[in-house]
Amino acid sequence: MIKLVARRLALLVPILLGVAAIVFAAVRLIPGDPATVILGERATEQAKIALRHELGLDRPILVQFGSYLWDLAHGDLGRSLTTGNPVGYEVVHRFPATFELAVAAMILALAIGVPLGLYAAVRRNSWVDYLATGSSLLGVSMPIFWLGLVLMLVFSAQLRLAPLSGRLDLALDVDAITGLYLVDTLLRGDLAAFRSTLAHLALPALTLATVPLAIISRMTRAAMLEVLGQDYVRTARAKGLDEGKVYWRHALRNAAIPIVTVGGLQFGTLLSGAVITETIFSWPGIGSLAVGAVFSRDFPLLQGCVLLFALTFVLVNLATDLAYQALDPRLRA
């Protein structure tokens, strides 16, 4: 296991270098001039030239990339062109919001998707199976931006059961400890802020959980159908074991490898791809930060966001591989 972790961490270096090179070139293809965005359309050409020189944007592209790699090797992601703050500070400050949203969405996806897929496999070709399969297909096909807007219209604008946007009511405040509002409010014992945070989290988490829920449900059903036909399941039933124990203790554990695979990939996607959901619900996470960086032509900030996405995805895949070994003793050899 130690060798696996060391090998995967060693692969981080070429992966991040490749991502850095691709992103560095791609962001400079975005139309627009950062100097014009920062100074405004009415700024003089002399002022724009001076700002480009100050930011180093007038240097050859290879020189800029070499300087960027040198700073990156020393742990410096640069400074935001719009705020002037270090990029590391900006992404670290925003990451807990994205992590909290992704974890909440993943908990919903697993809590609903696994039992739904298991029950559909057990009741194969019944109306429950058809309903679960149809719902999964609908969940995968439904556009996230449309679902988010519908949920806002119904539960926020019409029924007024959930807040429209943000992480917390404006009248409340949270003393940050971990950056995760649900955790911080519990640590502080602030139940009013906890309830407000939970209410603000509900709709974005439900919107973000739709696609992974559908995928996990279908994968659970397929994996369970394959396992339920194995000899050890028939033996467990022949020994008189309770059906619940047969499904949950014997069948589901042996079907867990593909479920964990899909779950790990989906969690990495949630962490790195919550851009649309965060934009719709004005959620102050990495996704909305990256969108703002695109509109403001903030090259260093956008590069920092994408590098964090890549790092997160690799670490989630590593955690998934370690989960394999915990679930299947044969892989430990």
Image (spheres, helix red, strand yellow):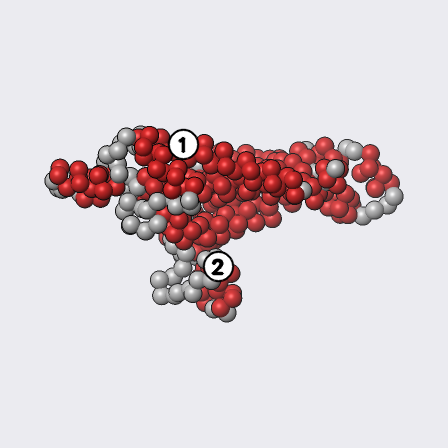
Q: How many marks?
A: 2
Vertical comparison of 229 with 196: above or below: above
Quarter where residue 331 is shown: top right
Which residue lies under the disc numbered 1?
Answer: 21
Q: Secondary structure at mark 1?
A: helix
Vertical comparison of 112 with 8: above or below: below
Q: From where the camera sits, is residue 86 visible?
A: yes
Quarter where residue 69 is shown: top left
Quadrant of the rendering where the N terminus is positioned: top right
The residue under label 1 is which amino acid type? Ala
Q: Is residue 40 left or right of residue 6?
A: left
User: How many angstroms separate mark 1 from mark 2 (CA)?
Assistant: 32 Å
The residue under label 2 is which amino acid type? Thr
Front-most of residues 36 and 291: 36
Residue at the spot 39% in from the left edge and 65% down from the top edge: 173
Front-most of residues 302 and 52: 52
Which residue lies under the disc numbered 2?
Answer: 178
